[in-house]
Image: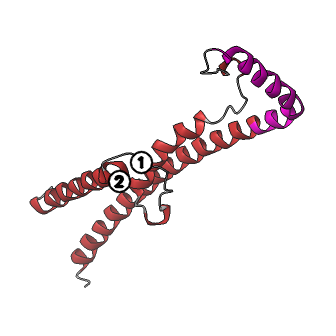
Amino acid sequence: MNKLEEEIQRLKSELDRKKEELSDLRKLVGRDVDREFPPAIEGMSDRELEIHLRDTIPLINGFVETKPDLRELKSHRKVFGRPIAAAKRALLETTLRPLEEFIDRQVKYNRQAAALLQALHQRSGRYAARIKALEERVAACEEDLVLLKSAAGIK
């Protein structure tokens, strides 16, 4: 690589580093934000999209199981805690039974959606690698064409 290409690479890496520093809204504000803001995906570069997907896929996988766990029901009250927790369990059990078929279908859908997102992410990564390889091959062919033209005396 010549000095110009090295400088371009250095500037690109510095720009990526600065974008990452500015990407977190909490760092800019200096405190927690009270609500999440959806990112503007249309304006993202390929690297920003890759980072967004890398951060989003684990979050989606965390929401795959939507069935409530009755054992996790607790109450913070000292005196009435156990009766209130028991009432919560009873209420949840009576409302959960009729909805169980719907919840099972939702869990299956969530699993399929998460698997599909991961598959699409993998496929886009493979396509990006293929495109890069093809661009390199095209660049090599263009160089050969320039050499052939100069050898043949064609402008």
Boundaries of the magenta span: 79-106
Q: What residue sits right under mark 1 in the picture?
A: 51
The residue furthest bottom is 155
The image quarter in which residue 101 lies: top right
Q: Residue at x 74, y 35 (%)?
A: 107
Indicate the secondary structure of the residue bearing disc 2: helix
Residue 23 disc label: 2
Does the CB distance between marks 1 and 2 fall below 8 Å?
A: yes
30 or 103: nearer the eye? 30
Quadrant in which residue 143 is drawn: bottom left
Residue drawn at (51%, 56%) of the image: 38
Q: Residue 14 appears at what percent x and percent y? A: 20, 54
Q: Which numbered disc, 1 or 2, marks the residue that appears first in the sequence?
A: 2
Task: Give neighbour class at mark 1: few <14, some 14-19, many 20+ (Cα, 10 Å).
Answer: few
Q: Nearer the viewer, residue 124 or 115?
A: 115
Three-letter code for the amino acid on which mark 2 is drawn: Ser
- Say whether residue 90 is left or right of residue 110: right
Q: Is residue 111 above or below residue 70?
A: below
